[in-house]
Image (spheres, rainbow, N blue to C red):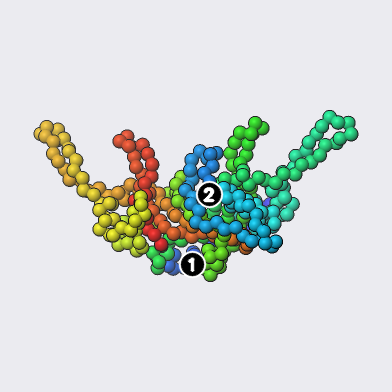
Amino acid sequence: MRHITCAFALLFLVPYLLHAQYDDLLHKRHISWVAEHTADYELNPVYSELMDVEMNLTKVLRLENQNGSTGLYQDLEIEHYLSAALLQGLQAGAFACFADSLLSRPLSPEQMEQRLFKRDTIVTDAPDWEGSVIVNAVPFEEIDLFRVRQVFFFNTRKKAFGARLLAVAPMVNTRDPEGNLTGRQPLLWIKIPTQRTCQSRKIVKSANYAVQTFMRENAPEIAVMQTAKGNLDLNKWATREVKHPAHRILSYDEFQPLKKAALQALIFKTDTIVVFAPDTFMENAVMVQENAIDGVEKIRFVQNWYYDARRNRLTNRIVAVAPLAAVRDLDGALRYYKPLFYSKY
């Protein structure tokens, strides 16, 4: 009976755990759409050769060394900066950590130590030597991906998308006995505290590390996101932006401002095709209206990420959004996704 009672309690607790960090968004009238999405990000400023695909592009916006208590400066591990910084924060106990992405199973100090430090016993044949235990911290070089759980939403007042970080997991590379990469698994999940707007602005200003990401392989389809409120028709949103831009529109290739007429000329095109009429054996030229938005399947969020090493705080914000249209060959096979334009906030 006790197990049944616990099961029912957990059943009612799950929706609360899912929405606790963004319950306010669900109750605001001007927030018309809210959806969760979990994806892997490259947040270090180096491309890892271990990656099969490039999850996203990462560009460094700011990287400042910080003055220590002694007035001397340490060398920065630039290529794996965030990996090293988060591991240092974890070892210092600066974060609330959990075993799962829903943040329902907190980790004790002992469990944290087991995940952050690996113990290996060396056994020898020496008669008077019982062996020794070597303690190795998880190397930051083995973390080249971060699994990010965040919520995206649409603000009808600002006519803009927003995002809120919920949890982040450093992904540790796993290897076989020969040292070959076999996969990646979350080291643990770090809860990202909900921050007021003023707190987030302080982190943006004080962060010593800031990068910008352009989604690539981790760009989502709206249908695969876990909707918590409302709905979003990506094609309708893109059409509205083309006809009546709510924000500055930039070209997809050179990021140059586009006036509405130039934007519409890129999206709506008229083409002439030749059609063969079998009844008359004649070829006729037919005018066809093409709408590039018809091919939109995904959305690209361009985000700035900020890490304040002094306060051990991570936050991000959406700075631009692009609809991604599928480009296919004559047989219908997907070649790549192309941004049509960028709506810049």
Figure check: 27 above or below 183: below
The amino acid on which the numbered mark 2 sits, given as a three-letter code, is: Pro
**Helix, strand or loop for disc 1:** helix
195 left or right of 325 in image: right
The amino acid on which the numbered mark 1 sits, given as a three-letter code, is: His
- For mark 2, what is the residue? 45
Determine which of the numbered discs, if any, sits on residue 27 in the image.
1
Q: Nearer the viewer, residue 268 or 4?
A: 268
Residue closest to the far right? 128
Say whether disc 2 or disc 1 marks the residue closer to the N-terminus: 1
Instruction: Residue 87: tell me if it is visible.
Output: yes
Q: Residue at x 54, y 53 (%)?
A: 149
Quarter of the figure that contains the C terminus? bottom left
Tell me the crowding category of disc 2: few under 14, some 14 to 19, or many 20 or more residues within 10 angstroms, Cα based.
some
Q: Residue at x 73, y 54 (%)?
A: 109
Q: Nearer the viewer, residue 26 or 120?
A: 120
Q: Horizontal and vertical percent for residue 177?
A: 66, 32
Q: Horizontal and vertical percent for residue 280?
A: 10, 34
Q: Mark 2 or mark 1, which is nearer to you?
A: 2
Q: Horizontal and vertical percent for residue 7?
A: 64, 53
Residue 158 is drawn in which quadrant? bottom left
164 left or right of 88 in image: left
